Amino acid sequence: MNRYDVIIIGSGLGSLLCGYILSKEGFSVCILEKHSVPGGCMQSFKRGENSFDTGIHYIGSMLPGQTLHSYWKYFGLSQSLGLERMNTDCFDLISLDGMDFRLAQGFDHFTENLAGQFPASREFLGQYVAALKETVSAFPLYNFQLTDKHTKTAWMGTNAWDFLNKMAGTDPGNRLLLEVLSGNNFLYAGRKVSTPWHQYALINHSFINSAWRLSHGSTQITDHLIAYITAAGGRVLTKMEVKKISSLKNKFQVETAGHEMLVGSRIIAGIHPQSALGILEPSLLKRSFQSRIMSMENTVSSFGLYLGLKPDSFPYMDHNLYYHSTRDAWAGQECKAAGWPGMYFMYTPSCSRHGEFTSAVCILSTMCYDEVKRWEGTSTGKRGPDYKTFKSECAEKLLKLVERKFPEIRSSITDMEISTPLTWRDYTGTPEGSMYGIRKESGNYLKTMILPHTKIPGFYFTGQNLNMHGAPGVTIGAIMTCAEILGLEYLFNKIRDAE
C-alpha cells in the first residue's frame, strides 16, 4: 500500500494550494481526483476552436500589494499567470430593466463613476465605500495581516440587504442605486433573506480593488500548482474516486473505486463536506456533527450556454454583463419554471478575443436543482429525450432574454453547448450542482460555519465551503487548513517573506 504524510481528496483550488504548501514543507503528498482531468472548478473544456472556463471567470485584487496578489506571490502564481485587466471604467455592467450602470475599478473611480449617474446619492456612495472598507478591515487575513484581534463576529450576523437598505434610506435615487449595488449578486448566489453582509463586502471589495481575466484560462492555475507539487515529489492521481476512508492504527486507510489502497497520516477533504462524510467510516463520526453538516442548504446552481460565433460578427466585451429583466436585482435568483430566467451573467472569454471581436460567448443564469431532479439518477449522454427537450426549451428562453439587449446574437451563433445543474454536479462533484457550496446564512452564521479542523484527529476540510468561496476566500481557507498542521504564525511568516 502507498503511504503518505497527507492524502488530499479532490483537486480543486483549495486542495492544490494545500498540496503546494505541504509539499514545500517536506510532507509527502498524494492528491486523489475522481475525474480524468484535475482542477475542480478550474477545469476548462473545448468546443471547436474555443475554450471555456468552468468556474473561475474573473478574479480580483491582483495589483501588487492587494490581497490575492500578496498571497499568490508565495505560490508563484502572481509572477506566472497570464492576466488581462478588465475595463477600468466598467468591469461589471449592471443592466436593470434596460437601464445600464457601470461599476469602475478603484474606490475613488467607482464612486465618481456612479455619482455621475446618481448625483444626489454621492453621500450614500461615500457611506457605502466606507462600510466596505470598515468591514474588510475586521478580517486580518484578508488584509494580509496576522493579529490576535477578533472583531469580525460583529458583522457575521448582519444581513446584506438589511444593511444596505438601512444605509440607503427612503430617497428614491438611493433605492435604484441600491439595486445597482446588488446587481452582481450572481457572484455569491445572493438571496435577500440570508446573504451575510460581510460576504457581500469582502467579494465586492476584492473586485472594486481591481478586476482581471485569466488570458489563458483558469487551467493555467492548475498546471502551475501541479507542476510544483510533482517536482517536490508529490503525486496528483486522476480517475481515483475515493469510496471509503477508515481508521488504521492512528492513520487513515483510503480505498478507491478501483480497489487501490493508500495510507495517510492525515487526510484533507477538498471536496464538499457532505460528500466527504459519505465516504468516512461511520464509527469516526459523531451523529450530531454528521446531522449538522448534512442539514446545511447549498447555494443555487446554474444553466449555461457556451456559444461559438461567426468571425467578426460579435464584439469582444472587456467587461462582464449582469442583466436583470426587472429593477429588482435579487428577484432573478429565485425564478423558477414559467418565470425563468429572470437574469443572466454574460462574458466573452479572453482567449476568444480576435481584435475587436470574439469567437465565443458564455451566458449563465441561476437554476434551482429541483428543475432537473427527475433526471438525477441518470448519467451524461443517457438522460433520454425528455431531458434533451428540457435543455432545448431552456436554451431558447435564455436566448430570447439575451436578444432583448443583443438582437443580433442568434445570427452570429455557429454552435452551442448547454449545461444544467446536473452538468455542474457531475463535472465539479458538488451536491445539487451548487455553484458555491454551502449557503452562508446571516440569521444563523455559526450553524453554517465549517472549520478546517474536525474532532477526528488528523482529518481536515478545505475549499469554498469553509471560509468563503472565490479565489481569495479559498486561498485563505487553504492557509487556515495547513495552519492546523504547521501553525498559523509559522506559515504566515513564510508567506509574508515571499511578498
Image (cartoon, rainbow, N blue to C red):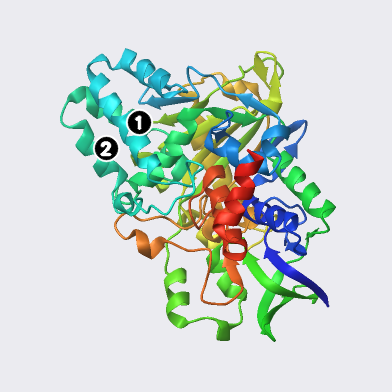
Whether pointer 2 and pointer 1 mark residues with C-beta atoms closer than 8 Å, the reply is yes
Location of residue 311 in the rendering, given as x and y in whole percent from the top left corner: 72, 18
Residue ID at (55%, 55%): 489
Residue ID at (41%, 48%): 337
The one nearer the camera, 304 or 245, is 245
Location of residue 241 in the rendering, given as x and y in whole percent from the top left corner: 72, 67
Residue on which disc 1 sits: 181
Q: Could you tell whether 447 is left or right of 496 in the image?
A: left
Label 2 to label 1: alpha-carbon separation: 9 Å
Location of residue 421 in the rendering, given as x and y in whole percent from the top left corner: 55, 52
Which callout, 2 or 1, points at the residue further toward the start of the chain?
A: 2
Residue 353 can be seen in this image: yes
The one nearer the camera, 88 or 238, is 88
Q: Quadrant of the C terminus?
A: top right
Residue ID at (76%, 52%): 37
Residue ID at (36%, 16%): 112
The one nearer the camera, 56 or 390, is 56
Q: Could you tell whether 310 is left or right of 139 in the image?
A: right
Q: Quadrant of residue 477?
A: bottom right
Q: Secondary structure at mark 2?
A: helix
Depicted 430 relative to depicted 63: above or below: below
How many labels, in total?
2
Q: Quadrant of the N terminus?
A: bottom right
Mark 1: which amino acid? Leu
Mark 2: which amino acid? Leu
Dot 1, how many residues are within 10 Å of its Cα: few (below 14), some (14-19), or many (20+)? some
Q: Secondary structure at mark 1?
A: loop
**Marker disc for residue 377:** none
**Marker disc for residue 164:** 2
Dot 2, how many residues are within 10 Å of its Cα: few (below 14), some (14-19), or many (20+)? some
Q: Could you tell whether 12 is left or right of 147 in the image?
A: right
The one nearer the camera, 202 or 73, is 73
